[in-house]
C-alpha cells in the first residue's frame, strides 16, 4: 500500500471517532516526537468566529514581510492539504502523509490513541519544523483549554471574539465559553483581542473581561495558563458615525491604538490605524475586522521578532486575499454566487449585514448540522434573501431538511417561499434556482458548492 493511501485510510478511520478533549495524550506523543521545547515561534488564534480568516490573513502578512510562515487551519473544504500551508502554498499530499504516518508510528510505540484533529495538529507542526518556518500560525480547533494546539507555548495569542457554540463541550453560557477560550492566553506572552464588527461588540467586550478574569484566577502548571495574562491590544465599544465606525482600543496593559473602519459600498471596507489606511480584501464588516486584527497582531510580532513593519508591504500582503467559502463572492455563468460558512447565530447575523451591503436578492441554498440552531439562523436570514431551498448536508451529523423546515415554520410568520429538497444536494438546488444564489449554513455544503463551481459541474 502506498504511503498516501495508507495515511488517508488511517485518517478516515479516525474521523469516525468522537471528540476526546484533554491534553495528556497529545502532549505525550508530541514529546515523543520532539515537537515540544523547540524554539519555533507559535501564534495561537482562537475565538468563535473569524479565527480562520484572522490566522490566514496573519500568515499572508508575515510572508509579505519576508518571513517564512506556516499556517494550520481547520476544517478543509475540498482537499485535506488545505489545512497545512507554508507561505500560502498547500503542502502536497505525500509530505502530509509522511507526517501523519510518523505520528501514527509514535502513537503505536507509546500505546496512545489520538483523534483525527490531534493527529493532523502534530503532523502540521512536524512539517513546520522540518521546513524551518520562522513562525507557525495555528488556528485553535475547539474552545482552547483542552484543544490540541494549546500544548504549544505561544509567542502571541489572539482571540477574535466569543459567542455561543459547541455548548455540549464548552459550556452552556457565554461566560463558560469565554473561560475555555481564555486558556490560550499566557502570562509570558502578549495577546490581541477582537475586533469583529458585529452587533454584539459591547457584549464581546464584557466577555473578554470575563475571559481575562478567568485566566488570572487559574493556578498551577496543570491549567497551562499562568495568572496575569498581559493584554496589549483590547478593543472596546464601537461608535457609528454614518459610514465611519470608530473602534478605539481600551487599555488594560500597554498602549491603545484607535482603529477606524469605513464602508466603501458594495460590501467593501477599509480601516485606518496609526495614520495608515488599509483596504480590506474581504467583503463585509466581520471579515474586515479579521483583517484589522491580523494587522494588529503583525504589529505586535514585529516587536517580538525584531523585523521592521513596512506599511506598504502590509498593503501588498492584503491585496487580493480571498478566504475561500467565507464572504466569498463568485460569478458563475453570469450569476453571482455567494458562499459563506456561517454556521451559528453570530455568523448568520454577520451574513445578514453583508447581504444588505451587497444589494440585490440572493436565493438561499441552506444546509446545517443537527447540533446547530438551524431554524433560528434561517429566521435571521429570511428577510434578506429570496427563495429558500433546504438541502441535505453531506455529513453524518446533518440535520434533515424536513426537520429544518418544520422547526423553521414553527418560528416564522408571513409569506415565504421555502422548499425542502429532501436528499437533494447543492447541485440540484443550483440548477433549480434562477439568478443569484447564496450557499450557507455549513462549511460542508460550502465545500460542495466550491467544488461544483470550480469544476463547472452546474448547467447554469
Image (spheres, rainbow, N blue to C red):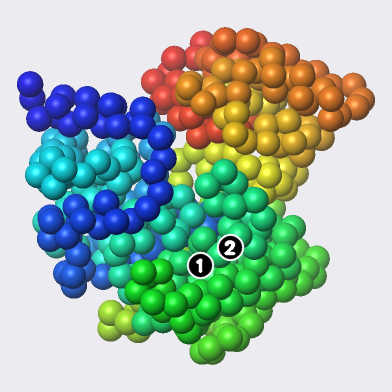
Count the marks: how many?
A: 2
Q: Quadrant of the C terminus?
A: top right
Q: What is the x, y in percent for residue 386?
A: 76, 26
Q: Is residue 276 left or right of residue 387?
A: left
Residue at left offset 52%, top offset 47%: 169
Query: Is residue 133 visible in this depiction of the protein?
Result: yes
Q: Residues within 10 Å of mark 2 (few under 14, many from 20)?
A: many
Q: What is the x, y in percent for residue 229?
A: 47, 80
Separation of residues labelled 2 and 1 (CA atoms): 6 Å
Q: Nearer the viewer, residue 149 or 296?
A: 149
Q: What is the x, y in percent for residue 251?
A: 60, 86
Q: Is residue 353 left or right of residue 233?
A: right
**312 vs 414: above or below:** below
Task: Name which quarter of the figure residue 222 lies in.
Answer: bottom left
Q: Is residue 390 left or right of residue 340?
A: right
Q: What is the x, y in percent for residue 123?
A: 21, 47
Q: Which residue is mark 1?
A: 182
Q: Secondary structure at mark 2?
A: helix
**415 vs 250: above or below:** above
Q: Quadrant of the N terminus?
A: top left
Q: Residues within 10 Å of mark 1 (few under 14, many from 20)?
A: many
Contact, mark 2 vs mark 1 (Cβ under 8 Å): yes
Residue 178, which numbered label? 2
Q: Nearer the viewer, residue 419 or 44?
A: 44
Residue at left offset 65%, top offset 18%: 401
Residue at left offset 34%, top offset 79%: 302
Q: Is residue 452 left or right of residue 23?
A: right
Amino acid at each position: 500500500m502506498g504511503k498516501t493511501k495508507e495515511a488517508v485510510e488511517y485518517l478516515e478511520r479516525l474521523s469516525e471517532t468522537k471528540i476526546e478533549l484533554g491534553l495528556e495524550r497529545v502532549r505525550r506523543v508530541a514529546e515523543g516526537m520532539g515537537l515540544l521545547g523547540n524554539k519555533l515561534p507559535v501564534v495561537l488564534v482562537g475565538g468563535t468566529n473569524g479565527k480562520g480568516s484572522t490566522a490566514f490573513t496573519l500568515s499572508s502578512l508575515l510572508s509579505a514581510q519576508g518571513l517564512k510562515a506556516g499556517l494550520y487551519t481547520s476544517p478543509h473544504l475540498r482537499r485535506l492539504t488545505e489545512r497545512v500551508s507554508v507561505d500560502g502554498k498547500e503542502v502536497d499530499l505525500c509530505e502530509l502523509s509522511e507526517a501523519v504516518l510518523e505520528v501514527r508510528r509514535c502513537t503505536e510505540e507509546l500505546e496512545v490513541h489520538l483523534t483525527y484533529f490531534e493527529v493532523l495538529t502534530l503532523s502540521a507542526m512536524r512539517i513546520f519544523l522540518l521546513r524551518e518556518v520562522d513562525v507557525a500560525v495555528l488556528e485553535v480547533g475547539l474552545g482552547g483549554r483542552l484543544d490540541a494546539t494549546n500544548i504549544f507555548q505561544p509567542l502571541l495569542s489572539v482571540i477574535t471574539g466569543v459567542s455561543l457554540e459547541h455548548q455540549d463541550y464548552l459550556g452552556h453560557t457565554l461566560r463558560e465559553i469565554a473561560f475555555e477560550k481564555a486558556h490560550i492566553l499566557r502570562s509570558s506572552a502578549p495577546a490581541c483581542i477582537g475586533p469583529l464588527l458585529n452587533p454584539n461588540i459591547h457584549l464581546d467586550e464584557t466577555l473578554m473581561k470575563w475571559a481575562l478574569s478567568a485566566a488570572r484566577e487559574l493556578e498551577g502548571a496543570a491549567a497551562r495558563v499562568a495568572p496575569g495574562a498581559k493584554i496589549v491590544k483590547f478593543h472596546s465599544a464601537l461608535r457609528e458615525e454614518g459610514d465611519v465606525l470608530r473602534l478605539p482600543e481600551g487599555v488594560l496593559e500597554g498602549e491603545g491604538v484607535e482603529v477606524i473602519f469605513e464602508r466603501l459600498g458594495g460590501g467593501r471596507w477599509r480601516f485606518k490605524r496609526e495614520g495608515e489606511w488599509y483596504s480590506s480584501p474581504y467583503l463585509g464588516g466581520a471579515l474586515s475586522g479579521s483583517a484589522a486584527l491580523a494587522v494588529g497582531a503583525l504589529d505586535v510580532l514585529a516587536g517580538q521578532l525584531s523585523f521592521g513593519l513596512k506599511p506598504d508591504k502590509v498593503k501588498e500582503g492584503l491585496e487580493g486575499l480571498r478566504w475561500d467559502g467565507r464572504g466569498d463572492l463568485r460569478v458563475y455563468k453570469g450569476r453571482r454566487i455567494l458562499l459563506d460558512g456561517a454556521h451559528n447565530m453570530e455568523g448568520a447575523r454577520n451574513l445578514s449585514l453583508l447581504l444588505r451591503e451587497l444589494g440585490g436578492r440572493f436565493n438561499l441554498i441552506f444546509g446545517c448540522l443537527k447540533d446547530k440552531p438551524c431554524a433560528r439562523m434561517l429566521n435571521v436570514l429570511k428577510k434578506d434573501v429570496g427563495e429558500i431551498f433546504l438541502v441535505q448536508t453531506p455529513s453524518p451529523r446533518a440535520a434533515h431538511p424536513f426537520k429544518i423546515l418544520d422547526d423553521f415554520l414553527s418560528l416564522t410568520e408571513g409569506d415565504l417561499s421555502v422548499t425542502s429538497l429532501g436528499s437533494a444536494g447543492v447541485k440540484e438546488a443550483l440548477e433549480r434556482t434562477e439568478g443569484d444564489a447564496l450557499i450557507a449554513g455549513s462549511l460542508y455544503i460550502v465545500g460542495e458548492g466550491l467544488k461544483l463551481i470550480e469544476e463547472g459541474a452546474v448547467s447554469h
